Image: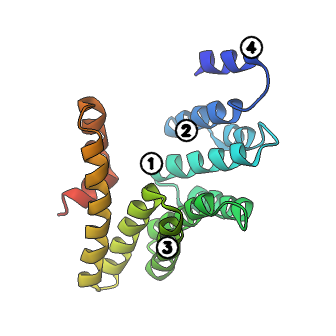
Amino acid sequence: MEEARALSDQMGGNFFRGMILAAQAWLALRSEDGADEPFAEARHASDSLLVSMWALRTEILASEEVGDARRLTRAGEELEDLARDNAPLWESWGRLGRALGAALREEWGPALDLAEAARAQAEAVGELRVRWRASRIGARALAALGRDEEAEAHRLGAVAILESEVTSLGSFPDLRASFLARPDVAELLDPV
């Protein structure tokens, strides 16, 4: 990461800097070294709205990985606010972050509502990664609310998207195995 940051410095400008800083912040969050400042630095590394949104999406993914509901909700809200009326794809990521936060707090009604809104918005713009993730949260919320048939329909919708992604990784066996080993993917493909 330090080499990437040094290369960014040598190139001048700051377009890639926010992405590099966001990746460094993810690593800091994994090691519990304090990621608040690195994520803030990543969000403000450029005047570019895209860089800020990219950093917030990275923060959502990292926060999901470590199970940080507070950070998911805050990053989701901030991303939604930045993207509102300008970037529906990124706004769907913000809603997903809020849905994930609510699910981690076991607030199943809000988790379901936010997941449904994220899924619908993602479907409208063709964002498959939000669609399957939101369907996963919707399935979990519906199951927790005792609506098992609807939960299974949501899970199967997510599985259909995932199967096409897995198929597309066919010529990359290591990447395919890594993807299939992810807990969120395994939860959908191998339900208990």
Q: Position of residue 36 (x, y in %)?
A: 67, 44
* Label 3–label 2 contact, CB within 8 A: no
For disc 3, the marked residue is: 120
Q: CA distance from mark 2 to mark 4?
A: 23 Å
Q: Are marks 3 and 4 in contact (CB under 8 Å)?
A: no
Badge 1 element: helix
What amino acid is found at the position of numbered circle 3 in the picture?
Ala
- Kindly indicate the quadrant of the structure image that contains residue 40: top right
Q: Could you say where residue 88 lies in the image, as x and y percent from the top left?
A: 62, 64
Identify the mark nearer the N-term, 2 or 4: 4
Indicate the position of residue 100 as horizontal and vertical percent values.
48, 64
> Which residue is under mark 4?
10
Mark 2 and mark 4 in contact? Answer it, CB < 8 Å.
no
Q: CA distance from mark 3 to mark 2?
A: 28 Å
Is residue 138 toward the left or the right of residue 73 in the image? left
Separation of residues labelled 1 and 4 (CA atoms): 32 Å
Mark 4: which amino acid?
Answer: Gln
Between the C-alphas of marks 3 and 4, the distance is 42 Å
Q: Residues within 10 Å of mark 2 (few under 14, many from 20)?
A: many
Quarter of the image where the N terminus is located: top right
12 lies left or right of 42: right
Residue at x 45%, y 69% (from the top left corner)? 103
- Camera-nearest label, 1 or 4: 4
- The residue pinned by badge 1 equals 65
Report the disc number at residue 26: 2
Q: Earlier in the sequence, mark 3 or mark 4?
A: 4
- CA gap between label 1 and label 2 equals 9 Å
Which residue is painted at 64% across and 50% down in the image?
56
Callout in the foreground (3, 1) = 3
Q: Residue at x 61, y 15 (%)?
A: 3
Residue at x 51% of width, y 65% of height? 122
